[in-house]
Image: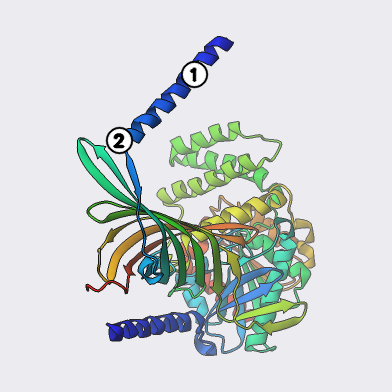
Amino acid sequence: MRRKSLLIFSFLFQFTFLCYGQNKSENQTANTQLSEHFWDRTEFKAGLVGTVFWSNGLSIGAEYLWKQNEKTKTRRGTLRTNTHQFLFNGNLGFVTNFSSKTDTGAYTNFGLTWRRTNKKGKQFHIELNPLGYYRTFLPETYEVIGNEVDKVFLPGRGYYAPSLSVGIGKQRKGKVRSGSYFNINYTMRTPYNSGALPTFSLQYGFRFNFKNKKQ
Amino acid sequence: MKQSFTITIKIMFLAFATLFFNACSNDHTLSNLDATVFVRHKGADMPAYIKGNAEEKLFLITLHGGPGGLGLGFRGNAFKQIEQNLGVVYFDQRGSGLSQGNYSEDEVTIDLMAEDVLALVKVIKRIYGEDSRFFLLGHSWGGALGPATLLQNQSEFLGWINVDGSHNPKDLYFEYIRNFERVAAAQIELGNSVPFWESVYDELDTVDQNLVTLDDFNRLNRLAFDAEAYLNDDGLINNEETGNVNTSDYNVLTFLWNLLKIQSILDDDIIGQLSFTDRLSEISIPSLILWGRYDMVVPEFYAQEAYDNLGSSEKRLVFFERSGHSPIFTEPNLFADEVIQFINQNK
C-alpha cells in the first residue's frame, strides 16, 4: 500500500515538473522597462456606476502602472503576445436611488488591478480593492434617546467596504481617451444590520491619459 | 483640450450636486405629505415614508408583515383612498426593507422593535407637533408587533387595526394542521382542485403533529400560500391588485438579504414561542379586526381569538368573504371603507 502511494506521488511530481518545463519552453516573459515619470504611468478614469434599477451614479478614479511584462506564447502555431499589467488603483464614487431617497452613498476604495491586454487592445482585468469605505447619506434623520429627539447633522453610516471587480475593456493606444471598461463589481458592506451586506453593481466608463497627445 | 476638461469637471460637479439635493429633499406640506425620514434608535436607522393628507395631524402608522417585509408594501388602491383621509406612515422595521444599522443579533428582540415604533411616534411628533394623533395598523407579523407596542404604551394611540395579524405564533403551527384539514375536506367536497387538496393530506402526514420545528413550520407556511393560490384559481379569493410597491423603491438584493437575516434572528423567538393571547385583555383602546375569510397563512380562528380576548370596550370584527391573507389587495375598496370609518369614529 505504502509503495503504491509512493509511486503515485512520484508520478504526480514528475508530471508537474515536466508540464512546468513544457510551459517554460513555450512561454516567454519579458519585463517592460517603464517610464520613470509619474504622469506617464498614471491614467484617470470616469464612468457610470450602479445597479440600473436602483442606485446609480458616477465614479472617478486613477490607476498607477506598477509593473508590466509581455508574455509571448505559441498557440496553434501562431505567436501571440499579451501585455500583463499590475496597477495601483483608487476610486471615488457617488450613487443614489432617484425613486426612494433611501439608498444614497459615497465610496472610496483602493487596491490592485491585474490587467491583460492582447494585440488588438482587448482587455480583461480583475480589480481587488481590500481598502474600501462606503458612507451612506440619509435624508432627514432624527435620533431618539429616551424622550429626547434630536435632528442628526449629515446623517448616514460608514461601512468597511472591500470590493472585487471583474471586467473587460478596450485600449486606445496613444490617445487621451486611452480606453474604456465594463466591470461587474461585488462590494461587501460591514457591519450592516448585524452582518455583512453583499452588493453587486455594474460600472462602465473611460480611461484618460493626459500625457498622450493624440485625440 | 484644457477648456473641455474644465467643462467636464463642471458638468460632473453639477451632476453630483443634483444627485445630492435629490437625495435630501422632503415635502412636509400637511395636506399633501411626501417625506422620507429616518428614525435612529438603538443602533438602527429605519426609514419612515410619510404620505397622504395630515391636515388634521392624524397619522396611521403601519407595521408590515414578515418579519422582514416592506413598509411601502401596503401601497395600492386601498391605501390610496386611506391617504386622502389622513397621513400614512409606512415604516421599514429594524432589519427590514432599507433599514440599516450596526447592532448585534442578540440585541434584536420584539420588545426592542416595539420600542422602535414608539420612537417613530416621538419623531412624528417632533416634526409635525405634539398635537399629532395616531392609529396603529399591523398586518400578519405586524399583528404581533402591534400588541407588543401597545402593551408598552397604548396611550399614544387612538385605535388599533389588526389585519390578519399573528398575535399568537406559538400555536400557529397546530392551527395550520387543523385549518388545512378543515379547508381540504370542504374543498374536496365542493370538487375544487381535488388533487391539490388531497396532496395537502399527504403533506400533513409528513410533518410532526405534536412538536413544532422550524422546517415543518416553514413547509406549512409555504403550503398556506400555495393553498390561497388554488382558492384564487377556484374563484373563492379575488385576484390581488398589482402595483403595490414600485420595483425602483427597494433594492431587491438588499431587501432579500435583510429578510433572510432578520428571520434567521427572530424565527426561534417567534415560532412556537411567542403569544400575546393572554395579554390582549390589557389592550383597551378601540380595535378593529379585519380578516380574510380564506386566510390560510394566519387562519380565521385567530380573528375570533383576537376579538374575544381584546380588552377594548369598542371593538369590531369584519371578515372579507372573498379574501385570503391580504384583503388590502383583494377587496381594497371594502378594506379602505372599513379603515376610514373606524378612524372617523375614533379620531
CA gap, disc 2 and disc 1: 25 Å
Quadrant the N terminus of chain B occupies:
bottom left
Considering every residue shown, the one lying at the far left of the view is A77
Query: What's the residue at 56%, 58% (across, down)?
Result: A197
Label 2 or label 1, whichever lies nearer to me, is 2
From the viewer's perspective, tell me whether residue A129 is left or right of residue A36: right
Query: What's the residue at 69%, 40% (across, down)?
Result: B212
SS of the residue under disc 1 = helix
From the viewer's perspective, tell me whether residue B81 is left or right of residue B89: left
Q: Position of residue A168 (x, y in %)?
A: 33, 55
The answer as to whether the residues below labels 2 and 1 share one chain is yes
Residue B63, quarter of the rendered image:
bottom right
The residue under label 2 is which amino acid type? Glu
Foreground residue among A82 and B280: A82
Q: Is residue B347 visible?
A: no
**In contact (CB < 8 Å): disc 2 and disc 1:** no
- Identify the mark at residue A1; answer none if there is no mark: none
Q: Is residue A112 above or below residue B92?
A: above
Query: What's the residue at 55%, 62% (across, down)?
Result: A131
Foreground residue among B132 and A61: A61
The chain ID associated with circle 1 is A
Query: Within 10 angstroms of label 2, few (less than 14), some, or many (20 or more) residues?
Result: few
Q: Position of residue B214 (x, y in %)?
A: 65, 43
Query: What's the residue at 62%, 34% (across, down)?
Result: B207
Residue B64, quarter of the rendered image:
bottom right
Look at mark 1 in the image and give the residue it sits on: A10
Quadrant the C terminus of chain B occupies:
bottom right
Q: Is residue A199 above or below residue B287?
A: above
Q: Is residue B306 visible?
A: yes
Look at mark 2 in the image and give the residue it sits on: A26
From the viewer's perspective, tell me whether residue B333 is left or right of residue B313: left
Q: Position of residue B75 (x, y in %)?
A: 49, 70
